[in-house]
Image: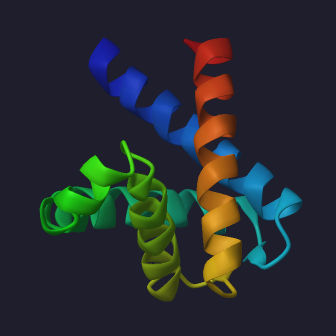
Amino acid sequence: MHFLLHIIVSWLVSALALWIVAQIIPGIEARSFKDTMIATVIIAVVSVLLKPILSLFALPFIILTLGLFMVIINAFLLWFAALFTPGFRVHGFVAALAGSVVLTIVTFVLRRVVF
């Protein structure tokens, strides 16, 4: 029961972070908080399925940039997840890049506050 509660709270925190990003970053739009909750699930699924594969292929770039290339991969995953999420849009790679960075920071801060 405690584990399930932790997953639900973590999901809500991530959805809140994504909603905040949609309010801050021009080019990222969410119609409602419900849409960001759905987008959060889709982002998680896309990350679980594609991130390991992309990271493996991009490993030389990740090493050369001391890990900073992961920001590019995260931006691509955010943009890609938006393609499958009704009510959530990312307009362009620059918005995805900015959104990825801000999403990482906002999620980190909210998780520190909640957990």
Instruction: Quadrant for the C terminus, please.
Output: top right
Residue closer to the observer: 91 or 12: 91
Quarter where residue 27 is shown: bottom right
Q: Identify the residue shown where x is 41% and y is 69%.
A: 77
Residue closer to the observer: 91 or 60: 60
Q: How is the image coloured?
A: rainbow
Left or right, residue 71 beside residue 53 = right
Q: How many marks?
A: 0
Q: Identify the residue shown where x is 52% and y is 78%.
A: 79
Q: Identify the residue shown where x is 39% and y is 54%.
A: 70
The location of residue 19, given as percent across then percent down, is 73, 55
Q: Identify the residue shown where x is 21% and y is 68%.
A: 54
Left or right, residue 51 beside residue 92 = left
Quarter where residue 86 is shown: bottom right
Left or right, residue 70 beside residue 30 = left
Is residue 88 among what the camera can see?
A: no
**Residue 7 position (above or below residue 53):** above
Quarter where residue 67 is shown: top left
The location of residue 11, given as percent across then percent down, is 48, 41
**Residue 104 position (above or below residue 76):** above
